[in-house]
Amino acid sequence: MLDPGLRRGGGVCLMFLGIDIGTSGVKAVVLDEAGAVAGQGTAALTVQRPQPLWSEQDPEAWWQATDAAVRAIDPAVRRSVRGVGVAGQMHGATLLGADDRPLRPAILWNDGRSFAECEELEAAADFRGVGGNIVMPGFTAPKLAWVRRHEPDTFAQVRTVLLPKDYVRLRMTGDKASDLSDSAGTLWLDVAGRRWSEALLAATGLSEAQMPRLFEGSEITGKLTADVAERWGMPCVPVAAGGGDNAAGAAGVGVVQDGDALLSLGTSGVIFVATSDFRSNPGRAVHAFCHCLPGLWHQMAVHLSAASCVDWVARITGASGAAELFQRAEAVGPASGPELFLPYLSGERTPHNDPLVRGAFLRLDNDSDGPRLAQAVLEGVAFALADGVDALRDAGTTVDRLAVIGGGARSGYWGRILAAALGAELVYLQGGEVGPALGAARLAQLAVDGGDPATVCAAPPTARVVTPEPDLVDRLAPKREAFRAAYPQISPRSH
């Protein structure tokens, strides 16, 4: 809890800063005590792809972008901040040497180079039983196995492995700490026991001594250093453990009780369902992780490309951005042409667990043009997400109502397509596009002020609700069947 001397005084409205270290950028959001957004700042990031299947970022870029995003917020707002929470892209392997400096670029969540190491780790330890998940190239453990094999000199120098947001925490506070939701995505966690597993670490040639300390997301891990506090124009306030981007996003929109669910439309796409206990179901590549709040877990269906596909097709068809692309697609309408898009630009997780598959346009004809390609991309992402919903339902999870967050939540037209493809009601929340930074700020508020998570992390007001339109469901059904049949045609595993 916060030192009473920093808590309140003089009628000052206390505020809480949430920072989300994403793949394409860093977002900083300040919430007041009533939960209203009082300030925001952003800074862009880029991804380096030096070889096929590789996806990397420089950890220093995360810190520079974080500093820029925070300093973009009004100084008067920053002076009222009394707690900080951090969220971030999951699974990234940030390898630090004895001086706590990165030994190499961080290997990101959408990097597919370690597929060979996945099979070896599956045979070496009970990752599915203890870690709760199939070993996939996106997770952190096989990345370290790859470094151990291909860069042994670097591996020998590793003293600490941190996730992206936790490297930023180190720069903010000097502490090596992480939360349970993000750490579950390393595959080194005993997810049911909410602790590191020495057996799973040993299978990768590591030990608990090389891991950060673990905290629940609403616990304080440290405080800002004097230098950072001075630079940001705020006291040396506490920093909460925070959460992986999806868990923090869930906390931001009230998905904090058993059965609550959300759809995140960021660079990747995620269907997230909160659970009151650990429910592992690796058979269909469904993830089972800790939530960022005590006593909660969650299941996820994860798709490596979602809104990133929208940005990609906008670029190749000459649209000025996502907004213009949505307009072009809406002008031609759903199922307006035969075109199919397979949105596997970076491989796929749920349900295929296939890092080698790549995206494709199929069934093009002489009338295929930019607007019809745009429409096909919106449909293709929706169909892939529907595959994930099917995997969750096959596991016995009810998915009939989803809160929607992320940049893709801005398009009401896409929402109609998504609702029809998923067969679920979509609830768009005011401020839902703020995403994980919102949840990070709420976790900071819990860490500083305490309180009931169900109250502090209540759902924001509903902006609109989109229900499946029967006519649209029928129009999309034949294309959905064609989409399902197309994956074996393009997967290298089928050849």
Image: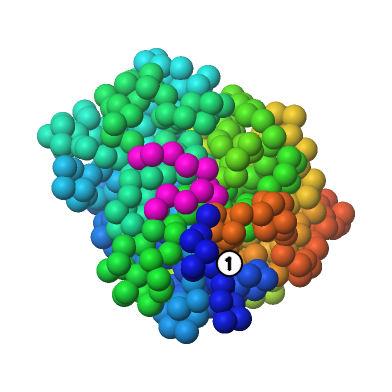
**Could you tell whether 467 is left or right of 456 in the image?**
right
Which residue occupies the foreground of this view, 494 or 441? Answer: 441
Q: Is residue 449 magenta?
A: no
| Position of residue 248 measured from the top left corner of the image (x, y, whole percent) | 56, 53
| Position of residue 397 measured from the top left corner of the image (x, y, whole percent) | 74, 34
Magenta segment: 212-222
- Which residue type carries mark 1? Val
Pointer 1 local density, CA inside 10 Å: few below 14, some 14–19, many at least 20: many
Residue where numbered disc 1 is placed: 434
Residue 321 visible here: no
Q: Quadrant of the C terminus?
A: top left
| Position of residue 96 measured from the top left corner of the image (x, y, whole percent) | 23, 44
Which residue occupies the foreground of this view, 82 or 28? Answer: 82
Residue 453 visible here: yes
Q: Is residue 213 magenta?
A: yes
How many discs mark residues in the rendered view?
1
| Position of residue 466 measured from the top left corner of the image (x, y, whole percent) | 80, 61
Image point (60%, 40%), residue name:
294
